[in-house]
Structures are given as C-alpha cells and as structure tokens.
Amino acid sequence: MKKFIWVTASALVVAGSGHTDATEKQQPALKTVRIDTLSVRDTLYHLSGGGGNTLALIDEINDGVVLIDTKLPDWGRAVLDALESVTDLPVTTIINTHAHASHAGSNPEFSGTKQIIAHDNTRANMARMDRYGGTNAASLPTTTFADRFSLLDDLDRIDLYYFGPAHTDGDIIVVFPAKGVAYVGDLFPSKSVPVIDTANGGSGLSFPDTLAKAVAEIEGVTRVITGHAPPPKTYAGRGQREAGYSTRRRGRTNWDDFKEYAEFTRDFVEAVKASALAGKTVDEATANLTLPERWAAYDMESARASVEAIYSELGDPSR
C-alpha cells in the first residue's frame, strides 16, 4: 500500500455572473490534499492542505472512517478523494476539535455520517454560525461531552479530553493511546503565539493552565499532530524510492514539543500581564515584550492580536 500520496480535486470558481471571454478562459482551481500514514498497520492517516490538519482512522471492525476535523468549506470532496486512495470505507464518524471553519467548515459535505462528536461548547459555538443553519443543521455535532469521551476499543481506541478554555472554550485533544499519537488542534497550532478567539470563549489568561493540565494528565503520547504546522519532511529508504513512498520521517513533533509550547505560552502570557501592569499600551507591549532567549525561534507575527485579547480580559489597564 502506498504510504505517501498526493491527491487533487478540482472545483470551478466563477468570477462574476456574466458570460464573458474571461470566464470562458478561467481555469478550474485545484484543491490539493496530501495524505500519509501515521501507523504501521496503515489505519491512521494524516491529511494536510485546505485549512487545519485532519486525521483519519480506518475502523475496519465497524466498516467506517473516523475523521478528525473536516477542513475549510468546499474541501470535503478533496478529503474524500484522498481517503478513497487508501480505503473504500465511508466516513461514518466526525470529531470536531473546535468550531472554526478551518477545522469544521466541510462538515456539511459529508452526507451519511452517523455521528459527529464535539465538546458541549463547540456545538453551541457552531450553532450560532450561518454555516450550520437551515439544511446544514444536520452537520452540527450530534454527540457532545463535558470533560472526557471515548470510542472504539483496543488498537483503535480514541480518547477525547477537555481541559478548559484556551483558543476557544471548546478545544479538545484527541488521543490514540495504542498508537501513542495525540492531535492537539489549535491548542498548539504551530511554534507561534497562541491564537485567542474571545468571541468563541477563548481565554489568554486561562491558556497556560489549560495546557499545563493536559501535560500533567495525558500519558503515553510520543507523536503530536498540531493544528496547522505542515507535516514533517519525508524521505524513502533504499529500495523504496522506486515504489514512490516513504516510511521514515524526520522532524516529527513530539510530547516534549507540546510541553515546551505550554511553557512558552505561560511565559508569553506573563510577559503581556507584566506589560499591562506597567501601564503600557497594546502597541507598546507588542513592540517590547520581554521573553527568554529560548523562545527566539517562535513566530511572533500575530502577537498583537494575542496581546489585545489578553488586555481585553484584563480590562485593558493601560486605558
């Protein structure tokens, strides 16, 4: 079986309503999903492209696919094409890690799904969005939970954890205990500042404690899939290049990386709080955040938005 596959799906994008030469000449926009395996038995797959990262577990016992997040709207067909390259089983269960469109936007495109699972707050957040109104209401989570939820058994077991508000108020961590894999969604999007969506219950002040609880409670995880970081570089060993796939990978994110991100987030939030206490404005705090040298490689491009969200929680003492 192939272990490294590129799959493309096409969608025609029409610019304008008139029939013109420009629209006749317009080329279809390609939607590309990359799929590669995360398990020796070829049952757990990683799908990238089209928004947040997606995982797919091939549940052969129950003749279905469990899909963790569905990507941006209009990417469902590309996801299905990718899955069809490795299995003929249908998507029967969806797990949404949180409400954002980059992770749940294609829910309506998976007709026939028997169950959609999410945290209580994620369903409430999604129910307020136009995307899931009217006929699309069937794509809202059908099963919700408050703290813990598990499904399937043995090698396919999936454990869902909720530790509190952070990126939103409904972010969950999806753990495959028998495989030592955890998908942490946008609790750890990449090595960058935490993204805080206060409109959907996110909390910068709670973010560090939420991550610390996850680090303290979850055990046995060796590989971590982040919300948006690209998959690790891959290469094929001798005798495999001709077959067109790779089984060995460098640059995997591991549990120590997640622990480090939790420490970075605490240092970042404490630095913002110190700036607020010193009476600095949001712009001044963003320009002069004092962080330990160990965080020099972290992307600070979106720091202002995160500083502003934390200041808002604090009541913006600079005003």
Image (cartoon, rainbow, N blue to C red):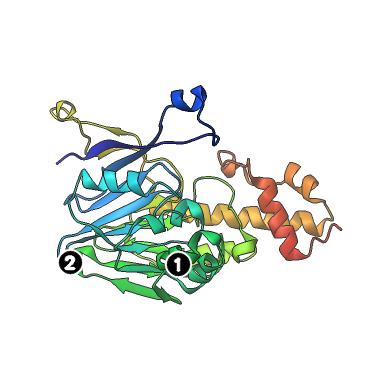
Instruction: Give the quarter of the image for residue 319.
Output: bottom right
Quarter of the image where the N terminus is located: top left
Instruction: Give the quarter of the image for residue 295.
Output: top right
| Residue that lies at the very extreme toward the bottom in this rendered image | 146
- On the rendered structure, is 26 left or right of 63? right
Cα distance in 3D space between marks 1 and 2: 26 Å
* Residue 3 location (% of width, % of height): 21, 40
Q: Against 157, is 147 above or below?
A: below
Q: Against 49, is 255 above or below?
A: below
* Residue 245 location (% of width, % of height): 21, 34
Q: Nearer the viewer, residue 292 or 151?
A: 151
Q: Secondary structure at mark 1?
A: helix
Is residue 268 something that shows in the picture?
yes
Amino acid type for the residue under numbered disc 1: Ala
* Residue 152 location (% of width, % of height): 24, 70
Q: Nearer the viewer, residue 110 or 58?
A: 110
The image's mark for residue 58 is none
User: Callout 2: 10 Å neighbours few (<14), some, many (20+)?
Assistant: few
- On the rendered structure, is 45 left or right of 208? left
Is residue 188 something that shows in the picture?
no
* Residue 76 location (% of width, % of height): 36, 49
Q: Which residue is mark 2?
A: 62
N-terminal-most mark, 1 or 2: 2
Q: Which residue is mark 1?
A: 137
- On the rendered structure, is 10 left or right of 204? left
Amino acid type for the residue under numbered disc 2: Asn
Q: Secondary structure at mark 2?
A: loop
User: Callout 1: 10 Å neighbours few (<14), some, many (20+)?
Assistant: some
Which residue is at a point 75% across and 42% down the rendered structure image?
Answer: 287
